[in-house]
Image (tube, coloured by chain):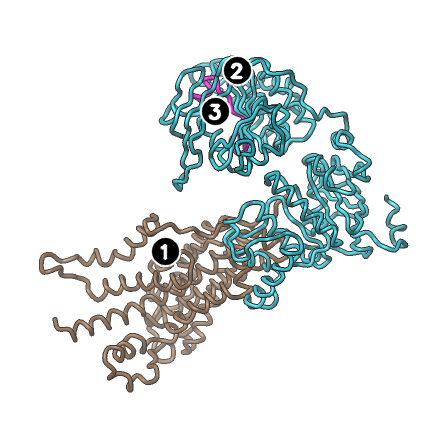
Chain colours: A brown, B cyan
Amino acid sequence: MDIAQTFLQFLLTMDMTIRLSTVLILASLAGLFSERAGIFDIGLEGKMLVAAFLSAAVSYETGNVWLGVLAGIAGSMLFSLIHGLASITYRGDQLISGVALNFLASGLTVVIGNALYQKGGGTPTLTGGARFHDITLPFVDVLRDVPILGPIYANVISGHTAIVYIALLAVPLSWWILFRTRFGLRLRAVGENPASVDTAGISVVRQRYAAVMIAGVLCGIAGAYLATSQAASFGREMTAGRGYIALAALIFAKWRPFYILGATLLFGFLEAISLLYPKIDVFSLFTIPVQFTNALPYILTVVILAGFVGKAVPPKAGGEPYVKER
Amino acid sequence: MANAKDQGRQETVAPAIELIGISKAFGPVQANKDISLSVNKGTIHGIVGENGAGKSTLMSILYGFYKADAGEIYVNGKLTPITDSQAAIAAGIGMVHQHFKLVENFTVLENVILGAENGALLRPSLAKARAVLVELAQEYELEVDPDELIENLSVGHQQRVEILKALYRQAEILILDEPTGVLTPSEADHLFRILKNLRQQGKTIILITHKLREIMNATDTVSVMRRGEMTATGKTSETSPPKLAELMVGRKVLLRVDKTPARVGKTLLEVTDLRVRDEAGVERLKGISLQVKAGEILGIAGVDGNGQSELLDVLGGISMATGSVKVNGDEIPLIGRHANGQARRKLGIAHVPEDRQRLGLIMNFMAWENMCFGYHNEPEFQKNRLFMDNKAILADTEKKMEQFDIRPPHPRLLAQNFSGGNQQKIVLAREIERNPDILLVGQPTRGVDIGAIEFIHKQIVQLRDAGKAILLVSVELEEILSLSDRVAVMFNGTIQGERITSETDEKDLGLLMSGIDGKAA
């Protein structure tokens, strides 16, 4: 294998990594806002699934993908609202509420999808304006001939759909909101010690709802990306556990925005490998079977959750409904 | 004072705070009954009362944490409806809670501005707070590093942050709820210096405490609360601790513990080089050695969190350790399956744990069930191999409830429905009545009212006079000094020094508690 070909392979892998990471970045940031405010959100999966279905269905019916995205966000936010009602207003168990929403999403999408399209729970294929298309960034043609950086710009950085860029911009934006604004300070305080916010005369409930709704918006975009950008239709259970992987990435990233970018890119990279190189030949001695490469992201998830990768300290008030002390 | 409302209007200086007819009920419990109170500007006003007397509820109403069912609040002579904490802050009222309301992994600055930011971005707020903090630090001896994380600060410094928070919000009236419970004596002295400074600058301070000495030393005026009512208000200089205690409890109370000199026997408990590491691998006990003889009380003093809890846990068989512990001359296992609470009880070591609600009782079990825990395998409680003899346990509980004056005397009441003092009596009754050779007692009177304190102290002294060895852990120096025959002070996992009680005082022990051995130096 010569160097030029290896470089091309590398570009292809990186391009794929970014495409596959996008949904994880958005979902992980959604989890970040929610959990930093003290609300565990195991329902990322369900919210994405609902958003994916609604965005595909509305895009298909209207022919406008942006309307689809809005519908996806609305659906995801509705689920967030239910999660908020259960876990903030009625102080229920956040894990149970999240799991329930996941079941609800998985059932509803299939039933409604089947009723509408009779395609086994999926939607018809989206074409034209009903789906996202790759954007070519400016100066690609000019820069293409610059050695090394040129091809990276042309093949890895340019040529993605709008949502990819939205996700990449969402990382620094989330950091800025959480660590440089009043809203972020209060949000983090609510997740660490809600009493500190309450005694300052600020509503813990409103702050937590705000966080959960932001998570809804981000999950909505993530779901819409799956159905209208990464794929061109909705398929049943198409989130395939990505909500849980996003949670693992969130823990791996110790609830920090830029670490999340790194963690999700790693998961995306593993997934890209398994898609591009199902069989890896190790010095012609033996072949790593496809099942193993496919399982890599999940193996990493287990390793992370078992706590092998450093000690991650979650927000202190996470999972606990806030009750005023007597 | 009920008429103060009308008179106060006409006087030149209106009181900083005036409460009129405040009432508040939680379900069937009347926490505050028609309370009126007036506090003059630029004074320190103390409020004393037993646990559950309604002090904290009253202050929570003043701070907008709860809404009163009835009554009016005047601030500086103006009727001010305080609907929430924001309204209280706007009216210039600040509160330092007993349990600090700080975000541990935020910096001092971030905690100070939280909820009082200027604008949506943090940078200008932080810069402003930094400047204000420097000013306040100079003015009131309130130095703290603005960029330090709260979790790295000592408790005393954390409390300063709470005071700074209130001052940053321009509080003119400062409420402090049991502020010295977690402080060393020298930290407490510093706090009172700060408070006097604040008073000099014209601030008004309301100090809630159950320590009568603090009331006498620090306040200008004092109010006493009992069972939700304000029973008396007056000048501090015109009252005395026994008088206040009587008003709090409603009867004459003996503040001093009556006891004869100890008649010491042979050594019953001998601890040598005891070491404990916590989960994070930090050494919590760094080679503790001590002895307790029959017929004496060894008091362990120290600020909370210096290894006293770990020491009790190891001796009580709750956690493992290395080193040696001899009971009556025989080595006992500190590791393995024989190091447990039941084994310890068989060896004659009874344990009244520090945290009775977590380790001493099961709160949603009934009193009679709680009364047999740890001894539930004793033959007298067994009907046969399979079944317990509930009737025997019930009868036993009834007997002990009478002996220890546990109220209400209902064995079938859940543990959580007893008051703090009565919960403690349940634990004490269970442990003492088994006639142990060694009694480990942690914070016997934490959250217990004065009337019950008297009773509990008497029980402990009686046990000593019966020739038992007693290890008493308490963060209340007064309790240590009045009960124990010898005192060992713990600091940072070591015994900082040992004293004969009659040859020491609070100042000497206070120095030891902050890690300084005044006598050795």
Q: Is residue B451 magenta?
A: no
Residue type pointed to by label 2: Ala
Q: As shown in the figure, which amino acid type bears the numbered disc 3? A: Leu
Q: Position of residue B372 (x, y in %)?
A: 52, 21
**Subunit ID for the residue under disc 3:** B
Whole-angstrom CA distance, mark 1 to mark 2, is: 56 Å
Judged left or right of residue B393, residue B16 is: right
Closest to the camera, between mark 3 and mark 2, is: 3
- At mark 3, the secondary structure is strand
- Kindly state the secondary structure of the residue where label 1 is placed: helix
Specify whether B267 is left or right of B175.
left
The residue marked by circle 2 belongs to what chain? B
Q: Residue furthest left?
A: A284
Q: In which quarter of the image is residue B369?
A: top right
* Residue A210 in view: yes
**Disc 3 crowd, CA 10 A, few/some/many (<14, 14-19, 20+):** some
Q: Mark 1 falls within which chain?
A: A
Q: Is mark 2 on a helix, strand or loop?
A: loop
Residue closer to the observer: B7 or A161? B7
Location of residue A314 in the rendering, given as x and y in whole percent from the top left corner? 44, 52
Which residue matches tag 2? B294
Viewer-nearest of discs 1 and 3? 3
Q: Residue A252: which disc?
A: 1
Q: Which mark is residue B290?
A: 3
Position of residue B205 relative to residue B48, above or below, is below
Q: How crowded is mark 1: few (under 14 residues within 10 Å), some or many (20 or more)?
A: many
| Image location (x, y in percent) of residue B59 | 71, 46
